Amino acid sequence: MGKRLRDPVHGLIVFDEKEPIDMLAWKLIDTPEFQRLRRIRQLGVSEFTFPGAVHSRFAHSIGVFHTARTLVKVLEREMKRNEQEFNNETAQVALAAALLHDLGHGPFSHTFEGVQESRGVKKRHEKWTADIIRNPSGRVRPLLEAHRVGFTEEVAALLEKEDPEDIYHAIVSSSFDADRLDYIRRDKLMTGTGAGGIDFDWLIENVRVAEIEIDAPDEDGSEPRRVQTFCLTAKARPAAEQFLLARYTLHQQVYFHKATRCLEHMISKLLRAVARLASGKKGEIKKSGLSETHPLIRFFAKDGETVENYLALDDALILGAIDAMSQAEDADVAEIATRLRERKLYKTLDLAEFGKDSGTQRNRLRRIREKFGDQIKAETVMLDDKAAIGIYAEIGGDDERMHKKLHIFDGERPVEISRLSKLIEALESKEQFTRFYFSDPAERDAARK
């Protein structure tokens, strides 16, 4: 027997009371740090476009843990096949990291990271996650240390690593890691996106472990670094193509949807305005419509970016403050808050409307920037030119690393899939898109002419 949860993607998820790592996971789920993820949507503002996309990072994280257990079993199988020794303690580190990997996401996830970066604070959610895990005043660290002395640092260090060091890291970060195996299926289900299929059981059956080169040889002639990761057999190639196509489709239709991107820019503008007021003179704070003790004000104030203040932030907190901010004295705060409350989005102009030709789009971009320069500076017209869609596109991450690319066996050698698949090769190059968001529909119409 044990604890059970029902999940729309995985069905019944069982936490076996005979498995120490399962019981640790159950206790971790009950901590305030993990429960906070109930109040952070997996897809941020996508529900404004896809009404069913209300799933949380709480549900996703549990799904990632469940999927990570499946990958651990695959790893046991493959290490036995290769006559290698399986390290259960290292596997437990990966399982705990899989469960806790999203603890550091802020409200509206990558949008909040962008706000912080614009303020000169380049601290990604992975670092926040590690800080939350290590926090001596938190509820996570004591549970990890009770499991095994030093376990906290092992888990936090794994989540901070950018490059893999062994096959266990692939469970948490690779082309076939537990995170994407959950979010692709979950986001596809909850948004109703139909294109692209995922034959999960067949993919898992055909997972193998092999070494790949993760960087180019050094100029001094030394050998490139090699690391073990998950690869797929040749007969799983059609399923692998569909897996990547499903991911591509989600980026195209959901993550980079024009309304979603517009809302993200509007929320970014709102939060930057609040941050400006919070970090200014004391009298400025009142212009935000929020009290001096509001968690957003505390966090954006000087020296306010502590773990405690960060954990007080979530989607629900900000959405719950929309009404108060709509009454703000500051024009930017009041305007955006009112628009969000009433779903009055800025109007989008996508340069793709003028055709695929890059020269035509560049000319149109130049003309619009010249004509609406003052509005762009004032952000009544917002320019979105930082996103591109490709088969390996990844929101908020680095998609160029070799261990993040899918490898298929070509004979005895693992090869990056685009070298074997014309379909994937055709989608590998990134398609840049450029959009403008206009507060005044008449200006959008004028920009079209």
Image (spheres, grey):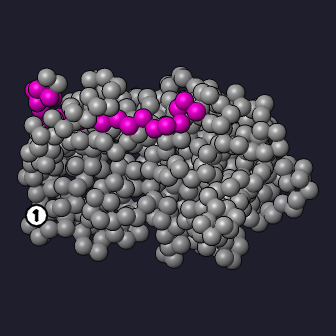
Please tell me which residue lies in front, 180 or 400.
400
Asked where in the image residue 387 lies, by quadrant, the reply is top left
Relative image position of residue 302 (x, y in whole percent):
24, 73
- Does residue 159 lie above or below 418 as drawn? below
Q: Does the magenta stretch include residue 428?
A: yes
Q: What residue type is labelled 1?
A: Glu
For the C terminus, the image quarter is: top left
The residue that label 1 is drawn on is 284
Q: Who is closer to the viewer here, 204 or 322?
A: 204
Please determine whether, in this image, residue 125 is positioned above or below residue 448. Answer: below
Instruction: Give percent across and percent down for residue 422.
Output: 62, 28
Residue 18 at least partly seen: yes
Q: Exactly how many numbered labels are in the figure?
A: 1
Which region shows up in magenta?
Answer: 425-447
Q: Which of 250 and 44 is in front in this view?
A: 250
Is 93 on the left or on the right of 280, as rendered?
right
Residue at 37% from the left image edge and 52% from the top image edge: 107
Q: Which residue is drawn at 68% across and 68% down?
A: 222
Q: Nearer the viewer, residue 233 or 64?
A: 233
Q: Where residue 242 sits in the image (x, y, percent)?
A: 63, 28
Give x and y (percent) for residue 146: 67, 73
The answer to whether 58 appears left or right of 90 in the picture is left
Q: Can residue 8 be seen in this view?
A: no
